[in-house]
Amino acid sequence: MAKAGEKSVGGGKRGLKRKAAAEEPQEAAVAGDGAAESGARPPKAGAFPPGFSISEIKNKQRRHLMFTRWKQQQRKEKLAAKKKLKKEREALGDKAPPKPVPKTIDNQRVPDETTVDPNDEEVAYDEATDEFASYFNRQTSPKILITTSDRPHGRTVRLCEQLSTVIPDSHVYYRRGLALKKIIPQCIARDFTDLIVINEDRKTPNGLILSHLPNGPTAHFKMSSVRLRKEIKRRGKDPTEHVPEIILNNFTTRLGHSIGRMFASLFPHNPQFIGRQVATFHNQRDYIFFRFHRYIFKSEKKVGIQELGPRFTLKLRSLQKGTFDSKYGEYEWVHKPREMDTSRRKFHL
């Protein structure tokens, strides 16, 4: 036999159910009257009202679910608009308007006063009288010495060895506590035209010094994103001894023009096209990406490429006149982040 309290609880539940059932038709009727008065249909399950704000939902799971639905709705609308525009362009044919150029940080770059004009007489005079004139006049052939910081680790040594297979007529020298001020006179005496120093930190290459001999200049780069050949997926076979081609992209300012000429002077003048090897220095937003590829002719119109490695990224820190001199050297350009990096659309190379 049930107690009086239990009957009252059960009766209370039944009473609540009856009350809810009685209220539901009324709410539905009110909603129907509102829709009938306005003459508009209720929104679909995937649509959202105009004043809807997902950030006002307090429940985290519900907010995440509604945000996911909103993103799906945005993608569907974007895809539908894209298909509609494509059909309109196909219908217009040759009369279709040109495609709009998307806005990027690169094409919104702040104009630089030092942008190089190939027809400028001052630029032509500087090229004829600078430190690289003897190379571009084919009076000298590049001969490169590659070395490291003191007591290098295996990763830095392997990078130097692989870099020597990319740059023709380059020699690797393992430093044993010898200062660079003593190495440079020996390089000049042995007719080396350039000196490359790979620095490291915590067993990882993090810096590169490139000094043009005998009169400079000297550039200091920060090195990052280093990948050796074994770390590159789907890489091709090891490079051959053929002289590679060299590609320099987007070195447009006077400073970038000087850096590009420094990289160009590392490679001989006459590339051997039979080797189908290309060394690329691509400047984008003041980051210099180095890649080494081999291209393969698949047909008369299609060409494929294989990355051979190594790869790394450089960021210019300073450009110094003359050879390396950390104490009394005169600097042409020094990167000062607080003063120079105030705008995302201003670049120096």
Image: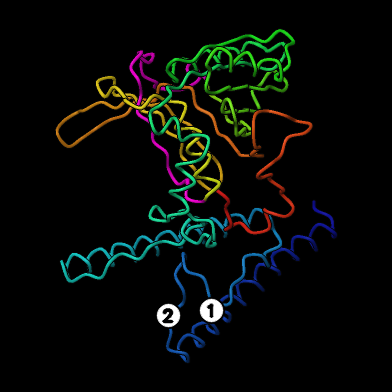
Q: Which residues are magenta?
A: 228-253
**Display colour scheme:** rainbow
Are dots 2 and 1 in contact, CB under 8 Å? no
Q: Please tell me in which quadrant of the rendered image residue 30 appears.
A: bottom right
Mark whose residue sits in front, 2 or 1: 2
Relative to 285, 85 lies left or right: left
Crowding near the residue tagged with mark 1, few <14, some 14–19, many ≥20 C-alpha atoms within 10 Å: few
Q: Please state which of residues 75 and 151 is positioned toward the viewer in this rendering.
A: 151
State the SS at label 1.
Answer: helix
Relative to 186, 33 lies left or right: left
Q: Please state which of residues 241 and 93 is positioned toward the viewer in this rendering.
A: 241
Q: Please state which of residues 343 and 4 is positioned toward the viewer in this rendering.
A: 343
From the image, tell me which residue sits under label 2: 41
Q: Is residue 299 above or below residue 19?
A: above
Relative to 73, 338 lies left or right: right
Q: Earlier in the sequence, mark 2 or mark 1?
A: 1
Residue type pointed to by label 1: Ala
Q: What type of secondary structure mainly makes up the magenta span? A: loop
Rendered location of residue 220, percent (x, y): 64, 33
From the image, tell me which residue sits under label 1: 28
Rendered location of residue 101, percent (x, y): 38, 62
State the SS at label 2.
Answer: loop
Query: Is 110 a magenta residue?
Result: no
Rendered location of residue 235, percent (x, y): 39, 21
Residue type pointed to by label 2: Arg
Crowding near the residue tagged with mark 2, few <14, some 14–19, many ≥20 C-alpha atoms within 10 Å: few
Rendered location of residue 275, percent (x, y): 29, 19
Looking at the image, which residue is at 61% across and 39% down? Answer: 316
Q: Is residue 210 above or below residue 63?
A: above
Q: Please tell me in which quadrant of the rendered image residue 277 appears.
A: top left
